[in-house]
Each structure stands twice: as C-alpha cells, then as structure tokens.
Image (cartoon, grey):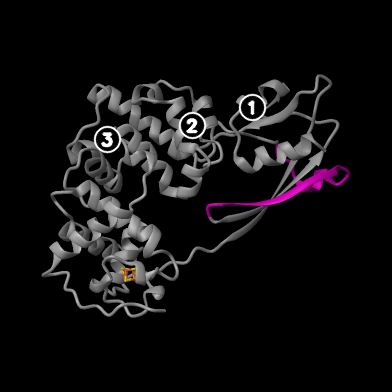
Amino acid sequence: MLKPIACGNLDTEGEVFRGALLEWFRADGRDYPWRRTRDPYAILVSEVMLQQTRLAVVLGKGYFARFMSAFPTVQALAEAEERALLRVWEGLGYYRRARMLQATALAVMERHDGHFPRDEKELLALPGIGPYTAGALRSFAFDLPAPLVDGNVMRVFSRLFDDAMPIDSTEGIKSHWRRAGALLDRDHPRLFNSALMELGQRICKVGVPDCLACPVARFCQSRQPESLPVKAKTTAITELEEHAIFVRDQEGRILLHQETGKRRGGLWRLPIREKERLSGAVLMHEMSYAITRYRVRLYVYGLTEVILQDGESWVPLEELDAHPMAAPYRKALGTVMDY
Ligand code: SF4
C-alpha cells in the first residue's frame, strides 16, 4: 500500500494539522442534513441513529427524514405514542435507542422547558446522554470546544500515532479522548469534529485507508495502517433457531404476539412455538437474520388451528401496517402473506 512518509510533528505543529484538515473539509466535506442545522434536537436524533446504524441506511433509506417529519420537535417526540415511535424506528433495530431518545426528550421538556442545556454536566444528567453525545451536542449544535471520539476518530488516531493499544480497553479509550482534547480546534470545534469523523469515514476507512488522498498524511506515524486499530475482544457469534407460525382466523385476521422486555418490548411478531409441536405443519418460509451477537435461522410454518398464548391477539389486515414489527418479521410476514 502506498503511504507518504511522516515528516510532521503533532506535538509542535498542531496548528498546521488543524489547518490542513479544515481546508480539506471546507473544500470536500459532505453535506448531511444534520450539518445544515444547529437544532440540538435534530442533531441528537441523527447521532442516536448513527450510533449503531450505517450512514447509508440512516440517510439513503430516509430514516432521518421520516423521523424528523413524524416528530419535528423535542415536544412532539416527548408526547409521541409508543406504537407510532416504534413504527417510525422500524428497520433501524436496537429499539432501546428509540425509547431512550424519548426519555431524553421528556427530561428536556420537564427539566429545561424544552431547551437543551449547553452545560456538560446538565447534558450528562439527562437520560441517554453519555460523554460522546454530550460532546456532539456541545460542538455540533452550540459550537463549543468539546472533544469528540467515536469509532472513526479512534481509527484515525490509532494510525496517526501508530498506537496499537486496544480501542476497546479503558486505557485506549482514555488516551484517544486526551488526544482529541489536545488537538481540538477551539476556534472551530464544530467543523473540526465533523472533519475528523469524516476523515475516518471516507479516507482513513476500515481496512485499507486511502492514504494518497489524506490531507494529514504528513503527520501519520503508521507504517502498516491497515493493521490498526487493534481490538482486545472478539465477539463470538451464537447460532439460534426460531420457529414461528402463520395463522389466519375466519375473518382473515393474522395472529401476532406483542413482545415485552427491554430489548423488543412493544414490538409485534409472528408467534413462536416449539419445533417439536410443528411436525405436521407446512414450512412456508425460512430466512436468516443477525441481531447483536446472534445469527438466527427463522422458520415460518402455516397452521389452520391454534391455541392462543399470553400476549397473542388477532390483528385485522388493515391494521397490520400500524403495528411496529422488527424488520425480519415484517419481511417474513410479507412473504407468507403472498404464499
Ligand atoms: S488515511 Fe489514515 S493511515 Fe493513511 S495517512 Fe491518513 S491518517 Fe494515516
């Protein structure tokens, strides 16, 4: 891989580093909707969506625009019904994020009369706001000199400083936040943080970086950047099976189950049964989906008779669309309805 030789010094030439990064970003930075606004609420929504969902999905599939259209203000989100909220979030996964976003909105309404605080301590006291989100709100919405470290920034710093300290270790995380604070452009925190994150997204990307296009390559100490960053833990994937049933009653209604619990509470899905009880049923559909550290094989069987269990109810066809449902189940349901 071609990579320029480092000749700059980040300890003594911070100003040159900041200048090169901002010059590149001003000329070539992307125009995302959340960069056109200073509304802390819109910025919060974008940040929470982007925490576990790719930019291409949040933007390309219209999630951010739909959410802002459904709940345009912090007050609208605070007053939203759970079903409407989960329906708009449907397909993004990690539904706890949607509920936490609403908890933040409620707290902003109750404690701050609908106005997001600028103070770091007050932001951190809100539910769902950690150091990253507080930094994002302070720098992106209020242009305050708050450092910001996400996965992209950690990758850039690991390479710039040729640092093999695991980015999922406490020490690794602390040292990258220290670097972010030391390098921050205090005159242009909003631009600087956006530029650094975008450098990681587009140039110093996962895998092989595009070093020849890098505006700060002269400061980069790494000789094998594709081997960085390092992670200490690897996530083991567990295989699971789910056996769901598809049943219509005489009125054409579909049997669904409403989930409880923290992760998927409030969402609907096809009811689950033990595999052993489905030996005579027709297998209508099978598919795989991934969720957190699980890879799930989902089987859907057609039944003509059923004994209802707790949480199950018949849903008329015309109401199906209003019932929030995790994306794999929405997809499976669509397939078996056409069976
Ligand atoms: S793209 Fe990343 S690895 Fe390559 S020169 Fe720039 S900072 Fe270094």
Q: Is the C-beta of the residue carrying label 1 under 8 Å from the nearest atom of ligand 1? A: no
Q: Splitting the image into four quadrants, where does ligand 1 fall?
A: bottom left
Q: Residue at x 35, y 39 (%)?
A: 34
Image quadrant in which the N terminus is located: bottom left
Q: Residue at x 17, y 69 (%)?
A: 10
Task: Name the N-terminal-most of marks 3 and 1.
Answer: 3
Q: Position of residue 37 (x, y in %)?
A: 30, 35
Name the foreground residue: 198 vs 329: 198
Residue, disc 1:
321
Q: Secondary structure at mark 2?
A: helix
Q: Amino acid at mark 2?
A: Arg
* Disc 1 element: helix
- The one nearer the camera, 18 or 324, is 18
Q: Position of residue 107 (x, y in %)?
A: 30, 28
| Residue contact between numbered discs 3 and 2, judged by CB atoms under 8 Å | no
Q: Horizontal placement of 167 versus 268: left or right?
A: left
Crowding near the residue tagged with mark 2, few <14, some 14–19, many ≥20 C-alpha atoms within 10 Å: some
Q: Nearer the viewer, mark 3 or mark 1?
A: 3
- Residue placed at 46% from the left, 31% from the top? 67
Q: Residues within 10 Å of mark 1 (few under 14, many from 20)?
A: few
**Which badge, 3 or 2, is on the more N-terminal residue?**
3
Cα–Cα gap, marks 3 and 1? 34 Å
In the image shown, does 91 or 38 lie closer to the viewer? 38
- Residue 320 among those drawn in magenta: no
Q: Position of residue 186 (x, y in %)?
A: 14, 51
Q: What residue sits right under mark 2 in the picture? A: 66
Q: Which residues are magenta?
A: 271-292
Q: Nearer the viewer, residue 159 or 95?
A: 159
Q: Is residue 252 in view from this perspective? A: yes
Do the residues under discs 3 and 1 have CB atoms within 8 angstroms? no
